[in-house]
Amino acid sequence: MKAITFVTQKGGSGKSTLCISLAVAAQEAGQSVCILEMDRQATVTDWAEHRRADTPEVAQIDATQLDDVMARLRDSDFDYVFIDTPGVDSPGSLAAIRAADLCVIPCRPTPADLRAFKPTLAAIYRLEKKFAFVLNQTPPRSYRVRDAADGLAVLGVLPDVNIVTRNDHQDALGMGQGVTEFNPTGQAATEIRRLWTWIAKRSQGLLHVKAA
Ligand SMILES: Nc1ncnc2c1ncn2[C@@H]1O[C@H](COP(=O)(O)OP(=O)(O)OP(=O)(O)O)[C@@H](O)[C@H]1O
Ligand SMILES: [Mg+2]
């Protein structure tokens, strides 16, 4: 079992959106996934309540419960546990980084987002955790995205796909679906599937990269 934590204290960068659609994409790729939600905003729990399917299982927990829950999950049949964290620095976020095999840091290509992940990255370095950035809510193409990608690539690992701003992400979540269910042939679905392929390899140590 691998734990993937979606973390950055910048609100609205796409932690919950990516967590949900990647969990669905991982299931479609044959993996069993559960989601631990550590954010009282309950974005993932709300999504699950609108959902027809029973999976992925979603549990809302707080920082004090994480170690016990993870110990139980390590002996379970789940291939992956995804942990969604709040958009503020909190004991929960730190515990979720500590529990992770891979930390995914979603980041919009804006100066504010590019500055805001630094404390998160410092904690990840301190705990010597593997991590990856994901550029989210990007325009399809722009110099700003290329500059942001160049900057992030220097700091650490960046997948070979960015997640473009697309209505499918918002509409899918509203319907209790992942983007690959909502519009399987859309570009948002294609990007999420590619991202899942990359993250799965990174979490399993199958990508040769220089960063942690
Ligand atoms: N690629 C995308 N295209 C379009 N909309 C997106 C995309 N990614 C995220 N959004 C939208 O941006 C908003 C914030 O996303 P989300 O809730 O996933 O961020 P978050 O990092 O979990 O925020 P918080 O820190 O508050 O938990 C949501 O309304 C979501 O639908
Ligand atoms: Mg969220």
Image (spheres, rainbow, N blue to C red):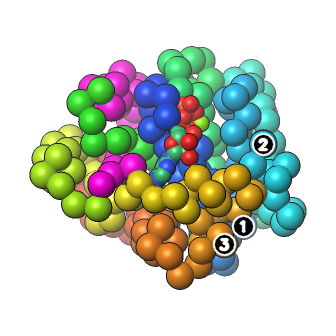
Residue 85 lies left or right of residue 11; in this view the side is: right
- Residue found at the very far top of the displayed protein: 90
Residue 156: x and y in percent read: 25, 46
x 79%, y 36%: residue? 60
* Residue indicated by mark 1: 32
- Residue found at the very far bottom of the displayed protein: 185
Residue 26 shows up from this direction: no
Verify whether residue 138 appears in magenta.
yes
Nearest the eye: 110 or 37: 110
Residue 146: x and y in percent read: 16, 53
Amino acid type, callout 1: Ser
Magenta region, residue range: 113-139
Q: Earlier in the sequence, mark 3 or mark 1?
A: 1
* CA separation in Å, label 3 and label 2: 17 Å
* Residue indicated by mark 2: 46
* CA separation in Å, label 3 and label 1: 16 Å
Q: Which mark is residue 181?
A: 3
Q: Secondary structure at mark 1?
A: loop
Amino acid type, callout 3: Glu
Q: Earlier in the sequence, mark 3 or mark 2?
A: 2
Amino acid type, callout 2: Asp
